[in-house]
Image (cartoon, rainbow, N blue to C red):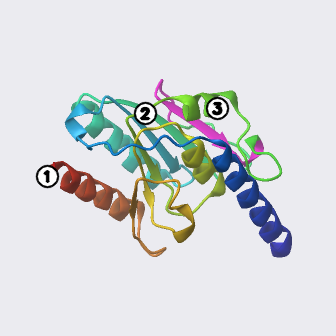
Amino acid sequence: MSVLINIKNIIANFYLKLELKDIVKEKKFNKFDFNNIENVGILFDATRSEDMELVKQYVAYLKEHRKKVKVIGFFNTKEIPLLTYSKLEYDFFSVKELNWFGKPTSVYIKNFMDDKFDLLIDLNIADHFPLRYISALSKASFKVGKFSNTDTEIYDLMIETDNTRTLKYFMKQVDIYITMLNKNE
């Protein structure tokens, strides 16, 4: 079974690279200023309830700073749990909403990718392809994600972390680097 999964991943990454080549990247050097950011997109693995709570707290923190936030959570299961936290700024999807290559097929995900967020934060520390796909094709102005040699064309800021680190650690690193960017202005 793992051979089939590896083949699917290779094909999915190949098609993602083709889609990225079709997108005309109009990258300009933008000065990053957290105070001028109005809307933020967040992607995360919602499978663990502890991670869901961390993201909810982070969304509350961003709202305190007068940011509009839109969140997409991915459940690495066939179904979305019935007791999922539901609000206007949250959407969730599961494995059931992916095509054979792992590409998300829902309309609200397409709309999320089309939103021109000032900042996109990809909290995908488990390297789920559907979340990486959304990040790659998002029209966000500034994208933050986990460091990977293969994702240099996706993110504007990549943060190094190993697979033993927690989401809480990664979120803390995101805040540290965003703060450092503001101080360099």
Is 117 in front, or is 71?
Answer: 117
Q: Which residue is mark 3?
A: 110
Q: Is residue 63 left or right of residue 110?
A: left
Q: Residue 90 in magenta?
A: yes
Numbered circle sitting on residue 2? none
- Which residue: 85% across, 69% down? 4
- Which residue: 74% across, 52% down? 102
- Which residue: 65% across, 56% down? 129
The earlier-in-sequence mark between 2 and 1 is 2
Q: Residue 22: percent from the left, percent from the top? A: 68, 43
Q: CA distance from mark 3 to mark 1?
A: 34 Å
| Label 1 Cα crowd, 10 Å radius (few <14 / some 14-19 / many 20+) | few
Tell me: residue 14, above or below residue 26.
below
Q: Is residue 81 visible?
A: no
Tell me: residue 35, above or below residue 8.
above
Q: CA distance from mark 3 to mark 2?
A: 14 Å
Q: Residue 73: percent from the left, percent from the top? A: 55, 43
Q: CA distance from mark 2 to mark 1?
A: 22 Å
Q: Residue 5: percent from the left, percent from the top? A: 80, 67
Give SS at disc 2. Answer: loop
Q: Which residue is mark 2?
A: 117
The earlier-in-sequence mark between 3 and 1 is 3
- Amino acid type of the residue tagged 2 in the rendering: Phe
Q: Which region of the structure is painted magenta?
A: 85-96
Furthest-top residue in view? 88
- Which residue: 59% across, 38% down? 92
Q: Residue 158: percent from the left, percent from the top? A: 41, 61
